[in-house]
Image: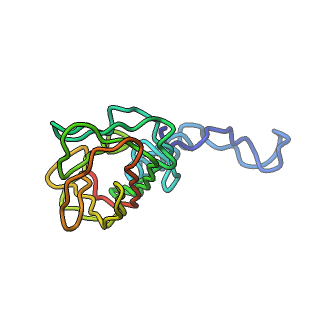
Amino acid sequence: MPVTIPRTPWIDDDGTGTTGTILNNAVKTQLYDQIDTALAQVAPGAATGLWQAVPFNAANFYADSPMAWVVEAGDVAINRYTVIGKTLHWYVYLNATSITGTGTTALRIVLPGGYTSSGGTSVMSQLHDGTNHRGIVLASGTVNNVTLQGDPPFVYTPNANGTYIIFLATLEIL
């Protein structure tokens, strides 16, 4: 959603159309355009600080082969983000997701809003696959996803509706 100021007419001081200072529409438009440009640099594509829900897409949740991570729409309790400047704040809470195949050490989620991380991020998270684990959310290198792994690393155990994830990440974005 682009950030713009509504273009309302400025006619006069008292609203009668007969008194006050008549403003040059071209000057007013130029002023609005300059403000819009400044706002767009602060929050490109979104109003600053507004939390946005991430539309569900099962393809945004995956694991490295030979493991598969199954996340259904009903498993997503919270998946919201906001952008302030070049910083993305992202809150994810997933209930009762499933792991199939042979367990590996990492799950992955695509960053919301089409953003790309500048990398180097490590955030604490809570992971549960039958056992509670402290986890980290990693975005290393220029990537469009984060990796969820245990700290220390562990192998996710295949299960039906038994993997829970919760994190609040703050990422630098490009």
Find residue 144 and report its image quarter. top left
Q: Is residue 102 above or below residue 105?
A: above
Give whichever of 95, 61 is nearer the camera.
95
Q: Nearer the viewer, residue 85 or 39?
A: 85
Tell me which corner region of the image, top left, top right, bottom left or bottom right, holds residue 91. Answer: bottom left
Where does residue 140 sit, x and y in percent of width and height?
A: 16, 55
Asked if residue 164 lies left or right of residue 25, the reply is left
**Residue 113: x, y in percent?**
38, 41
Residue drawn at (31%, 65%) of the image: 133
Q: Position of residue 70 (x, y in %)?
A: 35, 36
Taking depth in this image into account, of 127 and 5 the one nearest to the observer is: 127
Question: Is 165 situated left or right of 22 in this image?
Answer: left
> At x 85% / y 41%, what residue is drawn?
16
Residue 160 in the image: state x and y as whole percent.
38, 41
Residue that sits furthest to the right in the current view: 16
**Residue sitting at 67 percent across and 39 percent down?**
8
Q: Is residue 87 above or below residue 23?
A: below
